[in-house]
Image (spheres, helix red, strand yellow):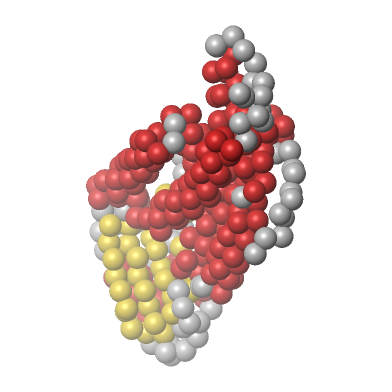
Amino acid sequence: MEFLVNAKFDFVSKRKAALVFSGTLILVGLGSLIVHKGPHYGIDFLGGTSIELEFEQPIAISDVRSAVSKAGFGKAEIKNFGAPNEILIRVQEQEAGTEISGAIKASISKAFPDNSYTVQLVEKVGPKIGAELRSSAFWAILIALLGILMYISWRFEFMFAVGAIVALFHDVLITLGVFSVLGLEISLAIIAAFLTIVGYSLNDTIVVFDRIRENLKVLRRETYEAVVNTSINQSLTRTIVTSLTTLAVVTILYFFGGEVIHNFAFALIIGVLIGTYSSIFIASPIVVEWEKRREAKKGRPMAKRA
């Protein structure tokens, strides 16, 4: 389906405005991370206890929170993970002593004698394991980015790889910044969302890069900037269709997937929007700037190519 066949938008000329916009978002996110002394890690990374309870009858989260607070865990995270009678309770290790689940279950049993429950799952993560998971998550993202750098350098040129990597860092930093500003928790599921965002954004960027490489051979009389603009416009229909269909799916997950994957779906929504934007306004313009400076070093402007 082609609905922007003859599009002639001048995306590359807007690269300075895009740089200001992206820089502002990144600075706000970094400022929030500094103020909050880093991301808001979940128990996956800090250590703690997760308890899944299934009650016989639906129960209000506020009532469960009141019972858990009486047990001494006022900062516990409590939400539904499925039906209205299914409750997930997560308590960070720093808030409690050695026996978290026992104290919580005793308090809930006392508060709701007429609404019995069964324990579906109890998971405990120690602080040491949490620290190891934080380290593993960091290295997973870093190794993925280095692998991408080598692959694109081999398939295209190094300047294309730099453009792609900068765009990927851009996408992850902005998504992380949004989570920090909103005070949302970073868990292993969110790390998986970050890696998904990296893959999605990279795929979109490579499609544009591939078209640029083809047009550099065909449009030899055009300037490099014109070739990049033409390539982005030729890929625009595909980019919009892919983004809208992906966005529709993750939006449905966000509203109807339940609270357990709520933050995961939200991260993907931000990632799809920012990833689509970065493939057009960040990755490709960086390639243009790189080529512009390379030509300047050779002592000639980016004129029409022979």
For residue 40, say whether it is visible: no
In this view, the residue in front, 275 or 261, is: 275
Q: Position of residue 198 (x, y in %)?
A: 46, 48
> Which residue is the extreme one toward the top?
299
* x 68%, y 33%: residue: 226
In this view, the residue in front, 212 or 57, is: 212
Q: Position of residue 250 (x, y in %)?
A: 55, 65
In this view, the residue in front, 164 or 118, is: 164
* x 61%, y 50%: residue: 235
Residue 218 found in image quarter: top right
As displayed, is residue 127 above or below residue 269? Answer: above
Residue 87 found in image quarter: bottom left
Quadrant of the drawing holding the N terminus: bottom right
Quadrant of the drawing holding the C terminus: top right
Count all numbered tags in the image, as a single digit.
Answer: 0
Q: Is residue 184 left or right of residue 89?
A: right
Q: Position of residue 232 (x, y in %)?
A: 63, 44
* x 48%, y 50%: residue: 203
Q: Position of residue 266 (x, y in %)?
A: 55, 59
Q: Is residue 112 left or right of residue 123?
A: right
Q: Is residue 174 left or right of residue 91?
A: right
* x 26%, y 46%: residue: 132
For residue 214, say whether it is visible: yes
Residue 145 found in image quarter: top left
